[in-house]
Image (cartoon, rainbow, N blue to C red):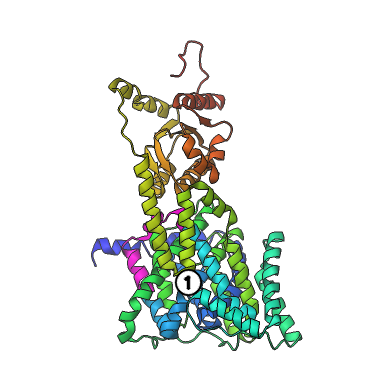
Amino acid sequence: MTGRAWSRVRSLLPGRDDLTAARRDPRRDLLAGLTVAIVALPLALGFGVSSGLGAEAGLATAVVAGAVAAVFGGSNLQVSGPTGAMTVVLVPIVAQYGPSGVLAVGLLAGVMLVALAVARAGRCMQYIPAPVVEGFTLGIAGVIGLQQIPNALGVPKPEGDKVLVVTWRAVEAFAKSPNWTAVSLAAAVAVVMLAGARRWPAVPFSIVGVIGATVVAQLCHLDAAAPIGDLPAGLPAPSLAFLDPGALGSLLAPAVAVAALAALESLLSASVADGMTVGQKHDPDRELFGQGLANIAAPLFGGVPATGAIARTAVNVRTGAGSRLAALVHAAVLAVIVFAAAPLVSRIPLAALAGVLIATAVRMVQVGSLKAMARATRSDALVLILTAAATLALDLVHAVLIGLAVAGVLALRAVAKQARLDQVPIKEDLSGDHSAEEHALLAEHIVAYRIDGPLFFAAAHRFLLELSGVADVRVVILRMSRVSTIDATGALVLKDAVTGLRRRGITVLASGIRPEQRQVLDSVGALDLLRHDGREFTTTPDAIAAARAHLQGSGVLPAPTATEEPVR
């Protein structure tokens, strides 16, 4: 191995900083890990059942993949395990290849993720437009909810790998032989979770609902409430017996789909965790590496493919986690449950787990974000709707590909419509060159940025990186008169950049915002930030004058004398 290749591999391995972070506040991380484990238990059981490999597979995934990804992943706050999005992909794989095929697919996907990490492909996430992600999430929520209908209705799961078809057949079976016990348990758990979370968001109502449903089913001898069934007391010994070398070729295509989904969901979840904190930033390549190792390890113990879990990661952040120790504690607590409480867990009614996952699906739908995307532009709304519909009708990988293709075509169309060639006199062009003035402003702790061309999903990430790197200034002026087009992703990135600068104590002023850009900026709340304390101006000279007045008022610059010329 060459020195360069070894250096790249070393950058993906845990370092001393990880251990230092874990020592800062272990008590808070222990509490956060315990809370996440309580939330994760019913989800791991439910997703294991939904995948077709059983509750024990969900628990094995949460323990093994959760621990490996916590150690080797690229985020200090990420919690990994079985997820609803992955379950959606696994159901047709189980139907076609059986449980052993799913385990082989998971291992192959893990190898692919490690290869992507070494190739530094983690930064490709920046090219996924926001409407595609929102449509993807909405579609997943719909599929997860529909997948729970058979267990919620108390009927055997019908044959088929299309969720709409399976749901319809389950409703038909329920109509012939209603099981109101199962329906009542599922509805009660879902209502407890949704209503309780609104009143007391810190309480893990998923476990409260599941325990309550289990107690009621046992005390009332509700035979119609089918339990999970026997669980092994512990993890199975590691094994490669599921591998069939002759079948590996046919499993490559589903493995690519699983690897793509694991990369997308894990990097998205890590980005969400960064946005919920100050000072945390994940390493996308290392995150792929950690998820790859997690997916190589989980199948050896009978676990399904895993990804970063947005819901559990959010709970981890909200309960005060500061390092990867919290995710490790979560995995350890679940391991104790597997070894010590398997008989009790086996009595949980399937309908109760269905209620947990239905409530989870409902909470995945962020109505505010969907409204913002729908109001931004017609193109963003169309991409969102198409991605969500494709997720329901086809599968997640095809849905993302369709969303990307449509977003690309519409973005190029927008750029083509906005492109123009204006002829200006040379004298006017020279008078508009502010390079000398900007150097003077920099000495006064002011820097001006002129944004030229389209600010849309392909260019937004680079814009955010450049603007986030501003240092040693007190005021940033954004000159936006030459922005030709802006979409929802660009508006969100602009909002994030302004928010980040303001957190660092930097005042942000804007000038020259065009009327056609206001709707998009307003839909995501970016315009409200720029309007803060009257910090939006028609022209750049007005913004410069306001910046100098602000610095003079704060004592950074000396007050003007009567002999000084006014700003031009």
- Magenta-drawn segment: 109-132
- Of 310 and 340, nearer the camera is 310
Q: Horizontal placement of 152 versus 323: left or right?
A: right
Residue picked out by circle 1: 86
Q: Residue at x 31, y 33 (%)?
A: 421
Looking at the picture, does residue 242 appear above or below residue 58? below
Residue 274 percent location from the top left of the image: 50, 55
Looking at the picture, does residue 388 appear above or below residue 500? below
Q: Residue at x 64, y 79 (%)?
A: 153
Looking at the picture, does residue 465 appear above or below residue 325? above
Q: Tell me if I can see residue 70 in this picture.
A: no
Residue 242 percent location from the top left of the image: 40, 86
Looking at the picture, does residue 544 appear above or below residue 206? above
For the C terminus, the image quarter is top left
Task: Tell me which secondary structure the magenta stretch mostly adopts.
Answer: helix
Q: Horizontal placement of 239 versus 375: left or right?
A: left
Q: Amino acid at mark 1?
A: Met
- Of 2 and 412, nearer the camera is 412
